[in-house]
């Protein structure tokens, strides 16, 4: 197969391929053709791609001959016009919130493989790009908070007295939340954490943090895929009310709650933020889908009237783009290695992974919920 990678928008520094991934793909028997200057965001010159075994060509030529095009972010419909019908477009496609891209894929006869739809199974972990990027986002969130907050994170004993440790509160204990907890603890903060899934309490405690429990009433837990179940409006209201005391004591808050295909749940309202100490920092990892925090502005840092900083900066993994690209490229490489055998895609009827991630095929959208959303928007 001939593989290429589509450059991302200027604000996105991550790459879908790195030289090490190119070497692996070439050893697997694939041809890699990359557009000139593809590695510029990470200062990877064309000569590095050539040394890894890729052919560097004009961008139009790279797309025209590709059997598979790898992406980091959902490509704009205009970008897809240079791909031949039947080409696979593999990567983050954000299908529920990038409907023009989904429509362009289907209308153009392109076969979109959406990594967000990767099954949560042990075997698929090495292909799980959502998890690899979420872990980095959790790390970056704490580092950003440490840079913005007006106090140190660890306890310090000085001749002039003892400085109490900063208090961090992590909302949502998925991959991003666990990494945020671990990072905050390494930096010396006192960490509390909360999740609607009681099953994660032991993971929180194993990292040295305190798991906070609230009585929400009704059922709460996780889906078969391991994601948190969406709460009812009544449960969300009870959650916010009981959370206010912990929020008021916190110097740093990291929110990570997202529900795939839906706007992010609102966890903290303006009243809760107004109860925080001046100089406190809130990092909202769900900013791109509406935010967990009232007052979050996607892509911006907001300072409230009482001096609380709310960071809606995204995508956070792009700020550690070198490592983010390394793991993302590995995720895609493992997916390609699994999905194609002797140049042929495994049949969806025989492979759960291919069946799950293949979003568009034969001019149609295969995912029922995405198709319904697209039809409703027409």
Image: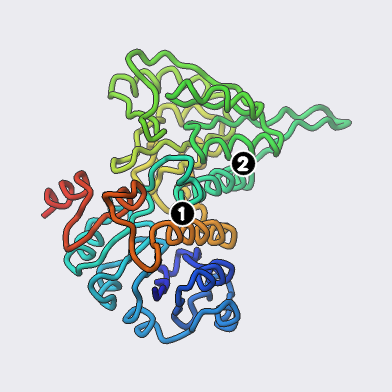
- Closer to the eye: label 2 or 1: 1
Q: Quadrant of the C terminus?
A: bottom left
Q: Is residue 86 left or right of residue 34?
A: left
Which residue is at the front of the view, 226 or 1?
1
Taking depth in this image into account, of 238 and 339 the one nearest to the observer is 339
Q: Which residue is mark 1?
A: 315
Secondary-structure class at tag 1: loop
Q: Earlier in the sequence, mark 2 or mark 1?
A: 2
Furthest-right residue in view?
Answer: 159
Q: Is residue 107 above or below residue 348?
A: below
Find residue 315 and report its horizontal and vertical position in percent: 46, 54
- Residue placed at 60% from the left, 81% from the top? 51
**Residue 281 screen position, x and y as percent:** 55, 39
Q: Which mark is residue 149?
A: 2
Quadrant (top left, top right, bottom left, bottom right) of the N terminus: bottom left
**Circle 2: element type:** loop
**Residue placed most toward the observer, 339 or 35:** 339
């Amino acid at each position: 197969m001939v593989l290429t990678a589509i450059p991302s928008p200027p604000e996105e520094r991550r790459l879908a391929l790195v030289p090490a991934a190119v070497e692996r793909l070439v050893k697997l028997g694939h041809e890699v053709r990359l557009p000139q200057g593809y590695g510029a965001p990470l200062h990877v010159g064309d000569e590095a791609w050539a040394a890894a075994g890729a052919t560097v060509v004009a961008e139009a030529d790279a797309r025209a001959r590709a059997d598979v095009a790898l992406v980091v972010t959902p490509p704009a419909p205009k970008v897809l016009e240079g791909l031949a019908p039947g080409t696979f477009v593999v990567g983050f496609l954000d299908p529920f919130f990038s409907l023009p891209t989904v429509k362009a894929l289907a209308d153009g006869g392109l076969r979109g493989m959406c990594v967000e739809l990767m099954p949560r199974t042990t075997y698929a972990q090495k292909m799980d790009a959502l998890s690899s990027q979420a872990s980095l986002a959790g790390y970056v969130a704490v580092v950003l908070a440490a840079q913005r907050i007006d106090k140190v994170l660890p306890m310090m004993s000085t001749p002039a007295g003892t400085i109490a440790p900063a208090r961090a509160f992590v909302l949502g204990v998925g991959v991003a939340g666990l990494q945020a907890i671990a990072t905050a603890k390494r930096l010396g903060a006192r960490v509390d954490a909360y999740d609607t899934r009681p099953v994660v309490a032991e993971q929180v405690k194993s990292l040295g943090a305190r798991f906070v429990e609230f009585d929400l009433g009704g059922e709460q837990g996780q889906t078969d895929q391991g994601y948190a179940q969406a709460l009812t409006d009544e449960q969300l209201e009870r959650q916010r009310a009981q959370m206010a005391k912990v929020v008021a004591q916190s110097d740093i808050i990291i929110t990570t709650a997202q529900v795939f295909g839906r706007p992010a749940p609102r966890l903290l309202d303006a009243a809760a933020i107004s109860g925080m100490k001046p100089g406190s920092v809130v990092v909202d990892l769900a900013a791109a889908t509406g935010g967990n925090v009232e007052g979050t502005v996607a892509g911006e840092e907001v300072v409230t009237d009482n001096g609380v900083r709310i960071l809606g900066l995204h995508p956070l993994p792009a700020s550690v783009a070198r490592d983010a690209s390394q793991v993302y490229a590995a995720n895609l490489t493992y997916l390609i290695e699994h999905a194609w055998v002797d140049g042929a895609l495994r049949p969806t009827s025989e492979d759960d992974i291919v069946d799950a991630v293949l979003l568009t095929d034969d001019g149609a959208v295969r995912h029922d919920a995405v198709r319904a959303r697209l039809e409703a928007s027409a």
